[in-house]
Image (cartoon, rainbow, N blue to C red):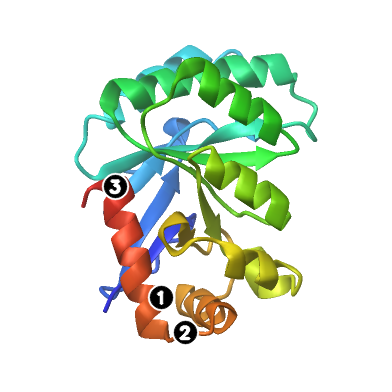
Amino acid sequence: MLFYNLHTHHSVNNDSIVELVNQYPWEFKGNVKIFSIGIHPWHIDEKRIESDLKIIDEKLYLDNCLALGECGLDKRIEIDIELQKLVFEKQIALAEKHQKPLVLHLVAAFQELIEIKNKRNITVPIVIHGFSKSEQLAKQLIDNGFYLSFGKYLLRNPELETVFKSIPDDKFLLETDMIEESIEQVYSKAAACKNTTLEKIQQQVEKNWKTIFGK
């Protein structure tokens, strides 16, 4: 069976792993098998926003571009949150135009995200990557239609095990992001948290992946 990796910056080129490789428009690489592309809030450059959005729009036409991301909001950085919202909403519009899911980076801005989703009536699937927060927030996000992806913090924060266990089986994905540990290690941890087998976690993530990405 395959391992599906929702978000990584480092391709391992292993035939047993389906990995969604994060790309930035200003350094796009055309030899990546499947990818997402977006403007991370950390990397917003006002002089480059329109050219970055144009590249994203062009790449979203490609079959091997499965999602727009990572994009989102981060209230713990110095970039003005209103500028972040503007860039985020422009990317939402592109995701809707191309009917491609969104992969989000979210820090301390979950209520703003819910407000934006409801205001814009977003129809494409939305995955919050690297989730590390409380069971209460996880439930609120799931109730509002979001998917949650787990990786680094599931491996390193024992308190997150209870949160992950509470996530409905059809609402989670798994990832490595930038950690050194393998996606297989993340899956093994997920199986232990859910008190199930590795194979059943693989089956469930594959089902969720195909629901979100359609392939």
Would you identify the image quadrant in which residue 5 lies? Answer: bottom left
Mark 2: secondary structure: loop
**Residue at coordinates 48% horizontally, 40% vertically from top-left?**
145
> How far apart are the two marked residues, 3 and 1, measured between alpha carbons?
18 Å
Q: Mark 1 near mark 2, Cβ–Cβ under 8 Å?
A: yes
Residue 213 is tagged as: 3
Q: Residues within 10 Å of mark 3 (few under 14, many from 20)?
A: some
Question: If you read the primary sequence from the N terminus, does the residue marked by circle 3 or circle 1 appear first?
Answer: 1
- Of residues 102 and 168, the one nearer the viewer is 168
Which residue is labeled 2 in the image? 196
Instruction: Please determine whether, in this image, residue 15 is positioned above or below residue 167.
Output: below
Nearer to us: label 2 or label 3: 2
Q: CA distance from mark 2 to mark 3?
A: 25 Å
Q: Name above or below for residue 47 compared with residue 58.
A: above
Give the foreground label among 3 and 1: 1
Left or right: 55, with 141 as reference point: left
Horizontally, residue 37 falls left or right of residue 81, namely left
Residue 187 versus residue 18 in the image, above or below: below
Task: Give the residue type at disc 1.
Answer: Ile
* Residue name at image x 52 percent, y 56 percent: 149
- Write the residue at 36% across / 33% down: 124
User: Where residue 196 sits: x, y (%)?
Assistant: 47, 84
Q: Identify the residue position indicated by label 1 in the image.
A: 201
| Cβ atoms at labels 3 and 1 below 8 Å apart | no
- Going by the numbered disc 2, the residue's amino acid type is Thr
